[in-house]
Image: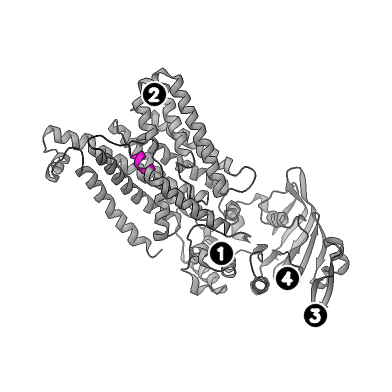
Amino acid sequence: MTALVARALTAGYGARGVLQGVDLVLEPGVLVALVGPNGAGKSTLLRALAGLVRPTAGAVTLDGMDVATLSRAALAARIAVVPQTFDTLFPFTVREIVALGRSARLGLFARPTGIDAAAVARAIDAQDLGALVDRRLDALSGGERQRVVLAMALAQEADVLLLDEPTAHLDPAHQIGIVRRAAELARSRGVIALAVLHDLNLAALADRVVVLDAGRIVGDGPPATALTLDLVTRVFGSGLAVAQLSGRTVVLPR
Amino acid sequence: MTRAAPAIAILAVALPVSLAAGILVGAVPIAPADVLGALFGTADQSTATIIRDLRLPRVLAAALVGGALAVAGTLLQGLFRNPLADPYVTGTSAGAALGAVGVIALGGDLAATIVPLAAFAGALVSALAVWQLARLGGRTTVLTVLLAGIILTSFAGALVTLLLFASDRLSLRLRAVLDILSGGVAVRATSELVVAAMVVALGVGLAIVLGRRIDAFVFGEETAATLGVDPERTTIAVIGAAALLTGAAVALAGLVGFVGLVVPHALRPIVGATHRTLAIASFLAGASVLVLADLGARSVFAPAELPVGVLTGLLGAPFFLVLLVRARRREVA
């Protein structure tokens, strides 16, 4: 079975290590929420998993292959990242942005094939963007734009989907919407999915929650198991309370 | 995308029309029939000289310069995700001018290929420096690109002045130096035009091939990487292509400002943002625009000729101001 694995992963910028020996196994079919306080190393872990940051020790492997040894094009065919910022001053259309997901499959001189066009069409359908394909990205609402970049990542047809704070620019209803979409994609397509999230209540919508603190994993499991009052207090301080509400874990101000 | 094809068709028709206008109009009135006669070798000696040795090379050079600058502007705007970038404001042109003036100071033969080569080298070093300077201490933004451009333009300008001051040779060739600094299209030999045409063809070809890779930079270098495009290699290839185009333009016409900025900017709402299409449209439009601007520059004070760079500067600077204000509003919003 496909798996994205971090083993004794240590990484960071300059002398200061941000990740301190992280061990993590990500498997298909579940959405993993990665949470932790500011500066815990969430984005660095996501970027290391995507092969964007070279580990100073340890490794990230996909099906046993070290991602550091793969070319950008080979990585993009296996791992898709939904970026955190997606602003542009240029009038790209929705279809053009989604088609960027096929960049890795096209040689310098190659034209997009029917396979590429079909992948783009599927991604557009999956995110209900059919009515918007010829609209300019900068003319869309925040929620619509988030769906466009998700569709761009889907068009890569990768085995791994990494989402970097996908809820950052959205209102609460769209925040829940995007996390549900990601969870649904993981289940229905059997992809490995991980989302960096700030909001613990959104994280509780995922199948599995990984808690990162000071570069180490301190909690890992289903929401109810990972987000205990004890752990939440230890990591985020004493200002929070944890409750169970109709079978769901919720985190509230104390 | 749907409007791109008709727009490119119109531009492809506009270019030969502009070229014809550039050849037909000049300080000495010549009837269209005699112009045709001169081109096909049946006119009298003086008409043939004016058309074949003066107007035709100048018009072709203007077309090459305008097309090259507009495509270089397309490349730099896409690479820096910055609608305000072009060879002129990023200091790439200033670096090319420094290279050209430098070899003239060293005694390089004006007509030889050494001037374009030095201009290319100067453009390449400047564009690489802008890329590195603009991302010092974090993210590349519209502002850091412009600031890096100011630094390079000032530095290159100071070095040119220093060369002028220190070199006896340059004071003897002040006219050639002034041509470079003021942006006048001047063709000294046919070989110069042929070399420039080949370099521009290579630069435009690279721009078309690299277009889709540049599209992948829309959300930044890191997203380009996760889309499967190697950011470093692509950046160096794009900068190399922009330097080829800028070097050729500066070798032919010196510092011609704002064509590279305005042309892609004006075309984007019509032909769309994808860089392959934009590069093709920008070449055609940039070539036409500079042929017509040069025609204007030759006509305003005829028979005296204004350097075309003066005209593009006068028209382009206010346009740049409007774009800057609009870009600032959007960045704040």
| Co-location on one chain, circles 2 and 1 | no
First along the sequence among labels 1 and 4: 1
Label placed on residue A152: 1
Give the secondary structure at mark 3.
loop
**Does the CB distance between marks 3 and 1 fall below 8 Å?**
no
State the image quarter where residue B333 is shown.
bottom right
Residue A136 lies, in percent from the top left, at: 48, 65
First along the sequence among labels 3 and 1: 1
Chain on which label 4 sits: A
Label placed on residue A247: 3
Label placed on residue B108: 2
Residue B21 lies, in percent from the top left, at: 22, 47
Residue B130 lies, in percent from the top left, at: 54, 40
Give the secondary structure at mark 1.
helix
Residues shaded magenta: B306-313
Q: Locate residue A32 relative to residue A125 in the image: left or right.
A: right
Residue hosting label 4: A202
Q: CA distance from mark 2 to mark 3?
A: 82 Å
Q: Is residue A127 visible?
A: yes
Dot 2 amino acid type? Gly
Chain on which label 3 sits: A
| Co-location on one chain, circles 3 and 4 | yes
Dot 4 amino acid type? Leu
Q: Residue at x 87, y 62 (%)?
A: A234
* Nearest-to-viewer mark from 2 and 1: 2
Q: Nearer the viewer, residue B44 or A159?
A: B44
Say if B333 sits above or below B97 in the image. below
Q: CA distance from mark 1 to mark 4?
A: 23 Å
